[in-house]
Image (cartoon, rainbow, N blue to C red):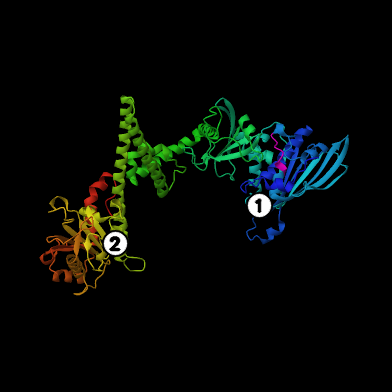
Amino acid sequence: MPMYTDVLGRVRNINLRPSKPLLPLFEAVVNSFDAIESAGETHGRIEIIVNRDSASLLLKADRTAPDITGFEIKDNGIGFTDDSLISFQTSDTTSKVKRGGKGVGRFLWLVAFDKVEIESHYVDAAQMKYRRFSFVPKGDGVENLESSSSEKRECSTDVRLIGFKDRYAKTCPKKPETLAAYIVEHFLSYFFRKNCPSIILRDNGSDEILNLNDFFEQEMAANSKLDLYKIKSQDFLMRHVKLYSSHANDHYIHFCAYDRVVKSEKITGRLPGLIKRLQGEDGRTFVYASYVESAVLDACVTSERSDFNIAEDLHELLPEEVVWSEIKKASIDQSGAFLKAFTEPVTKKIKERLESFVETEAPMYRPIMNHIAENVVICDPEIKNDDLDLKMYEAYQSLQLKAKADGKSLMKDIESDTDFEDYENKLKEYFDLVTALNSSDLARYVCHRRAVLDFLYKQLTIKDSGKYRTEDRIHDIIFPRGSTSAEVEFDKHNLWLIDEKLAYHKFLASDKQLRTMKPLKSHSKKEPDIIVFDKACAFSPSKEMTFPTITIIEFKRPMRDDYTKDDNPFNQVVEYIEAIKAGKARTTDGRQIPFQQGIHFFCYIVCDIAASLEKQAKFFGLDKTADGQGFFGYQKNYDAYFEVISYSKMIADAKMRNAVLFDKLNLPTSIS
């Protein structure tokens, strides 16, 4: 019994990605190339007609190109002979295997289109014949087959792809010139042949006609170069092309099989200096494309011609096998060598841009530039600072991972029998890297301090509404509200703005009720803005005493001026002190101990100096500082030192303390 083909089942088993909407058209065009070659026609003609939905044109307010509904491909090849029909009705036929045919291309038509209509005039027994039929996704696929004699004098075939399915139509290029570019690029090897047919693209929506041969000559033939290279003894041929057309936006390497593009690899951003468009010798800008051919690729192309059956990485059992990672790398290297003359000027500009950025905006990268410069691939000399900083930071993180891996490797080496001199060299390289990273981290922290000062200054300026920001915003900058030192890492808070010593503490809580704090046993629900329990250090009288000083920090809204005898920060802080003294302290392991007498309090009130605050400070017995920017004094009854710091003084003093660090990194010291 003969074997029948279930066309609908075959179509369902074919994977055609929406990103490849033109593949069915390409299959029809390659059939025309084959038909002309089979006929031995030296004046071959192919006409590609773009059919559009004329009704949709009336609905488009912007008069853009109407939707594409299908394509028609006409040629003067050998025609649809009896042998052609038998081959057409045979799934996975081998009739074109020598030309790279897989026998499944026509099924792609029914994946993307509702149906296909075919008409053909051909020679049979020295007589002209006519044949027509429909190709549909049911049964054996062939419907309404008709044959008769023909009055035509020339062989021809007309293939109509009808009913472009939405998922493919919406991703299909619409402009005629863009379609022309894709067709020429896909069949580039055919266009380079001496007997390439005359190919016309006709758009029935605009009546525009494009000669693809002329397009090829103008855009590609005059701007191409051939290179031969080897990968593990296998020959590869690359044709470099400079595309001056405007449709191309990215640089690609196209991998071909049997003169047709199968897989494309975008290389934009993967070569130094490879920006979006390069400048040619004549001053015009171009996009680069290359086309790779090899017997290896011909042998491994998939049946859908959308990929290659090539292993991604080297297999241990087949060390001589050419794998995809090697093909890709070698091809990118070839492209880089060809493009060097065009990318070097860009690379120079990018280097200057990088150096300027590090010198003026990002000095934290200066210590590690020798280690990361090659890994920072920039595609635009005009790259924005934020985008450049992101790329630099990614390279910095990669360097940190490398240092960690190198350190582990060295630890393993020292346990084995290694060459001492070689190990010593590796050790030196490792510590040079670690030193550079440490210097970078220190510089990064200094830059962080400068940014915090700048940000804090802006937060203290008046808002568009005419009001000043609440103290909460300033509070969060210095230390996040509702947090403790167990939750906030050392380098994530900014207590140094008030006093550098506050960075070294035993326990710290921000906007937490006193009764919730581990070092205290207290039932008070009062919430000081920030309370700091300092380390006992050397002058701790016993191991049981967990801290000798407690620091309380209270923030007030910028520009507030309504303090009274009952409502002022001094009374608030005193209430905190009394609540703490009334409770009990506990050790780090949870043991309760009496609150130690002699513990001193350091109390900071951060606010703007207003008349009502100045009045309450004097009532509280505080003295004005020499610069007039605050108050200070010791309250013996509470064992507490009080200091009132204005926001302006806090920023100015912090800037002064850090000025020498900013100067070392060439950072501006003025706040603006």
The C terminus: image quadrant:
bottom left
The amino acid on which the numbered mark 1 sits, given as a three-letter code, is Ala
Q: Nearer the viewer, residue 241 or 172?
A: 172
Q: Is residue 105 magenta?
A: yes
Query: Above or below — where is 8 with respect to 603?
Result: above
Which percent across, then down, holds residue 299? 64, 32
Quadrant in the rendering for residue 3 = top right
Q: Residue at x 40, y 48 (%)?
A: 385
Which percent across, then down, holds residue 285? 54, 41
Query: Above or below — where is 249 with respect to 500?
Result: above
Quickly name the residue at label 1: 169
Quadrant in the rendering for residue 597 = bottom left
Q: Is residue 672 magenta?
A: no
Q: Is residue 514 left or right of residue 213?
A: left
Instruction: Indicate which disc residue 475 carries.
Output: 2
The N terminus: image quadrant:
top right
**Most prominent secondary structure in the magenta stretch?**
loop
Answer whether residue 168 is visible to the viewer in this image: yes
Answer whether residue 201 is visible to the viewer in this image: no
Mark 1 is surrounded, within 10 Å at the Cα level, by few (under 14), some (14 to 19) or many (20 or more) other residues, namely: many
Q: Earlier in the sequence, mark 1 or mark 2?
A: 1
The amino acid on which the numbered mark 2 sits, given as a three-letter code, is His
Mark 2 is surrounded, within 10 Å at the Cα level, by few (under 14), some (14 to 19) or many (20 or more) other residues, namely: many
Q: Is residue 435 left or right of residue 151?
A: left
Q: Nearer the viewer, residue 644 or 113?
A: 113
Badge 2 marks a residue whose secondary structure is: helix
Looking at this rendering, what residue extends furthest in the front direction?
591
Q: Which residues are magenta?
A: 100-106
User: Are dots 1 and 2 in contact, CB under 8 Å?
Assistant: no
Quadrant in the rendering for residue 469 = bottom left
